[in-house]
Amino acid sequence: REKWRAAIRKEFRDMINRGVWRTVKRRDMPSGRRLVKNKWIFDIKRDGRFRARLVACGYSQVPGIDFQNSYAPTINDVTWRILLVLMVLNKYEGRVVDVETAFLYGELEEDIYMENPPGLGNSPDECVKLEKAIYGL
């Protein structure tokens, strides 16, 4: 149990350091807005690390209010192969980098309000306004 608690503390620490949300009073939310739900997802990595991720339940968002479109720029397999061929042909050196909290760098265009994450310890009359993207949005 202590390893899971440590994983949750680490996730909270990363989110606070990145400025992922700020606490607001529920009465200050715009009228007609709903709170996005959230939950914890737990995983044990191959190297034995315990990981906890706070995930927004994106299915509770309302299209047109909570978001306009959903788009995530990713590289497709053909582009990836072309890059690898160019690296080989030009004798470039490649490196693999793992950005542990990469998802927490995403900027939000809309105002998203979320229920208090379990374990945050906020008052019931408070919620969080997301400043950055989290998993599940």
Image: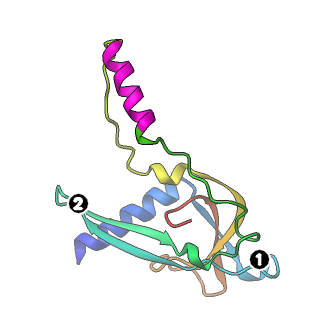
Q: Residue at x 45, y 69 (%)?
A: 54
The image shows residue 12 at horizontal and vertical percentages of 44, 65
For residue 95, which quarter of the picture?
top left
Which portion, as a residue range, is magenta?
Answer: 78-89
Task: Residue type at mark 2: give it.
Answer: Lys
Q: Residues within 10 Å of mark 1 (few under 14, many from 20)?
A: some
What is the secondary structure assignment of the residue under circle 1? Answer: loop
The image shows residue 117 at horizontal and vertical percentages of 51, 76
> Which dot marks residue 45?
2
Determine the residue located farthest toward the front in the rendered image: 78
Above/below status of 106 relative to 10: above
Q: Which quadrant of the figure contains the N terminus?
A: bottom left
Between 64 and 15, the one lying in front of the other is 64
Residue where numbered disc 1 is placed: 29
Q: Residue at x 45, y 34 (%)?
A: 79
Residue 26 sits inside the magenta stretch = no
Q: Residue at x 32, y 72 (%)?
A: 42
In the rendered view, does 16 fall on the left or right side of 89? right
Determine the residue located farthest toward the bottom in the rendered image: 124
Q: Residues within 10 Å of mark 2 (few under 14, many from 20)?
A: few
Residue 82 sits inside the magenta stretch = yes
Task: Residue type at mark 1: give it.
Answer: Met
